[in-house]
Amino acid sequence: MGAQLRIGAFLLGCGHHSAAWRHRDSPVESLGDITYYESLAQIAERGKLDAVFFADGHSVREPESGASWFLEPITALTAMARATANVGLVTTISTTFYTPFHAARMLASLDHISGGRAGWNVVTSMFDQEARNHGLEAMPDHASRYERADEFVDVALALWDSWSEDALILDRSGRFADASRISRIDHDGKHFRVDGPLTVPRSPQGRPVLFQAGASEQGRDLAARRAEAVYSVAYDLPSAQSYYADVKSRIERAGRDSNSVAVMPGLVTYVGSTVAEARAKKAELDLLLPTEQSIRQLSLFTGQDCENWDLDGPVPPLPPLEAFTGPQGRYATILRIVEKDAPTVRELLGTLAAGGGHATMIGTPESIADEMESWLRGRGADGFNLMPPTYPQGLEDFVDHVIPVLQARGLFRREYEGATLRANLT
């Protein structure tokens, strides 16, 4: 069969275009209705996608923009597990704001409830506004966050392994479990003291599948040591190939098989029966984009005061990546867009409006499949994390029109291979 793509869907409100909620057909009134998210997971499952994924934020930065978070991810995914049978359920949990025991217990519970479909996207969080909602004055520095994250993951893995597969006896004559098969972990580290064992017996996958999304040096190293799949940011194939080669080499240096770790860049798609129709879908959304809010977002992404920038002039010079103290993945992408396309400020806002600078493919099902295949064959990606500009329509367009083309080319499954997320992803 040859190499096949791994494809997940990144669920976010009404869609990844920042003006999606303003569209006349948007489901904005349903964002608090769990049946809406269940329906999105069912669409993904109809397309045989590997997983649906929720990011998470811990502060409300632009309440008028429609970009603030809504349902808590673990809670939503637990309900969605009951409405689906095969699609994986991946959640972000921050190692800066949670404790390992809390995270391990929630994820093991989700894995039990879903029959082995849970995944964890390991993040360290970003913004001072989030930190102040958790009793901190500001975010710890980057190196400290990743040091804590390393220890956090170690503890979570030990907790999941604290119950052996055969620990449960369930003998009604008097033995519920074999105590010799349940172990304390007795962890005493710099950031955490955890005795263990976990209060949840070993789950169907043993350990939920670990995802990682860091673009910094420390993030890439953490992915190399621990991740089973990597969410990445790449605006074009050359930048994707650079990231892919670097992460795969780090995985090998960490003593792991790089072929066992899927690199999945974010992907925004506008699908039409013609290229013109696809472009019209993007243009319709771009017309709804509020300029002032977009400029504030650009200021956040770049660490610059962009309020007085000339919208129809070139993007002013930006500091080099090594001088930027904020989230580096997004900033590196902006630098790449500016270098490659030399956009005006207004054009940059349009590019960032959907997906924030992730790869964008606009065209017919066949042309989009062509591009995806070129990324796979060109060692830029093992798959993609879909970021539809609108939900549910953007996801339906992809599932109903692009997936059949990929299947016909032998690039994507026709049926799920296994019963767990790990079995399907590997």
Image (cartoon, rainbow, N blue to C red):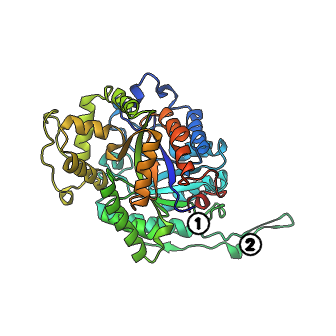
Q: Which of 326/418 is in front?
A: 418
Between disc 2 and disc 1, the foreground one is: 1
Left or right: 4 as drawn, with respect to 301 = right
Circle 2 sits on which residue?
178
Q: Residues within 10 Å of mark 1 (few under 14, many from 20)?
A: many
Quadrant for the C terminus in the image: bottom right
Q: Looking at the rendering, which quadrant does residue 201 occupy?
A: bottom right
Compared with 374, 78 (above or below) is above
Residue 328 drawn at (x, y percent): 28, 55
Residue at 27% x, 32% y: name it.
Answer: 293
Judge whether residue 79 can be spotted in this image: yes
Q: Which residue is mark 1?
A: 160
**Residue at 61% across / 40% down in the picture?**
42
Q: Residue furthest top?
A: 24
Q: Secondary structure at mark 2?
A: loop
Q: Is residue 68 above or below residue 131?
A: above
- Residue at 28% x, 28% y is 290
**Residue 146 visible (yes or no):** no
In the rendered image, residue 200, in percent from the top left (x then y), is placed at 64, 60
Query: Mark 2 or 1 closer to N-term?
Result: 1
Of the pair 165 and 390, the residue shown nearer to us: 390
**As drawn, is 302 to the left or to the right of 103?**
left
Q: Position of residue 310 (x, y in %)?
A: 13, 34
| Label 2 crowd (10 A; few <14 / some 14-19 / many >=20) | some
